[in-house]
Image (cartoon, rainbow, N blue to C red):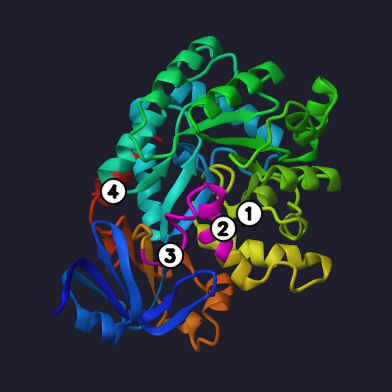
Amino acid sequence: MTESVDLLVHGGTVLTVDDASTVLTDGAVAVRGGEIVAVGPADELRASHTATDTLDASGGLVLPGLINTHTHLAMTLLRGAADDVTLQEFLGRVIPAEARLLDPGTVASAVRVAVAESLRAGVTSALDMYWFHEAAEEAARAAGWRLHTGPLFMDVPEPPDGRPYKERLEWARQDLAARPAGTRPVLFAHSTYTLSPEQLVECFALAREFGALIHLHVAENAAEVASVEVAHGRRPVELLEHLGLLGPDVVLAHAVDLTGGEIAAIARAGASVAHCPVSNLKLGCGIAPVPRLLSAGVTVGLGTDGAVSSNTLDVLAAVRQAALVHKADGDPTAVNAEQAVRMATIEGARALGLGAELGSLEAGKRADLIVLDVNRPHLTPRHDPYAMLAYAAQASDVRDTVVDGRVLMRGRTLTTLDEGAVLADLEALA
């Protein structure tokens, strides 16, 4: 007696990234209704399941889809427009450009390119902070891609959507109230330097009224920290703690310039950190104290930031950088290969409050997974799958990408996007 499923991914090495770090050398994943219903030896699952569709992963590595825990997807429009500058110079260029250029149409076009790039890189979901989030959601939904986004609060003189802060509160309330049942809403409070303490309190209160995840930039570099301290008498994390805003529903992007007391405060509150090592290095921000955060028990995910500050949406590149850069102090075990891979998968899911749904290949979770072609010179021989992913694998090794049980890239061909048209559209806008 066989069980019918929608998709059977079989024949490769399955890296489950579960709590036991289970690896199946000839494994399979069975999917029905977008949910993983079984993970086990390939021979057993082939014998016990009849599949409408299959992915032959022979010669491949099957693992959970990568999760980008901090990005600005539509910044693909400005890729290459603010290189080799400090964070403050970067903001001085980008914020005025956004005011001039952004509207729902440009955001949708830029997000479609970001989704195509992400699918090719094995990224199956992202936490996306940007303007016109409704247009981004529509573009991602049309491609079948998993996007976590929501209203953005950033009190700047010329917001691209023309909506002043006070109007944003009611608009955001309506947006959060309209979220589909079963999906966690998200609210973005940009930072402690673009929102006043009073505004931060209002934003966090609104988010918590709806049980929303709250995401903001914090302590990205020393100059930011100094400016907040001058303005408010406290460093960014100190200010959030003083206002009673830190909590397990908060994801802090960057968190580079932290004191020991601030690390302890983040850990006590149960807040998470989105580590963006490539962006932080490129902007000269420094290196986040990730080993100390991990030692304190803080959940750390990985992000690329936008394609202006990091130039790509390649989470595997962030995995490699995270595994390497923290060794600079002389400890090669500071962040090991498995820790870096877990940051991009299960720990990223936990940071977003979605650890029960995403981030590992286990029965009952949503079927977000990727297949890497490992029969390549730079991946041969293969002794340790985690080390291979962290130190050698590239985005171009991704062969298949599945989101919610739907194959969105098969054999390196995108199935839900006209890639040529998408690229031509953004090039014309740029």
Residues tagged 4 and 2 counted as in contact (Cβ below 8 A): no
Q: Quadrant of residue 42?
A: bottom left
Query: Residue 304 at what x, y percent from top left?
Result: 55, 50
Q: Is residue 38 above or below residue 168?
A: below
- Circle 3: element type: strand
Of callouts 2 and 1, the N-terminal one:
1
- Give me the residue at 30% from left, 66% from top: 37
Above-or-below relation of 179 to 300: above
The amino acid type of the residue labelled 1 equals Val
> Can residue 106 be seen from the camera position used here?
no
Give the CA separation, mark 3 to mark 1: 17 Å
First of labels 4, 3 by sequence position: 3
Q: Amino acid at mark 4?
A: Gly
Q: Which residue is mark 4?
A: 144
Whole-angstrom CA distance, mark 2 to mark 1, is: 6 Å
Query: Which residue is tagged 3?
Result: 64
Residue found at x 70% / y 26%: 193
Residue 208 vertical placement versus 287 (above, below): above
Residue 426 in magenta?
no
Split into 4 quadrants, where in the image is the C terminus? top left
Magenta residues, start to end: 342-363
Nearest to N terminus: mark 3 or mark 1: 3
Q: Nearer the viewer, mark 4 or mark 2?
A: 2
Q: CA distance from mark 4 to mark 1?
A: 26 Å
Residue 350 visible? The answer is yes
**Residue ID for mark 2:** 347
Disc 2 vs disc 1: Cβ atoms closer than 8 Å?
yes
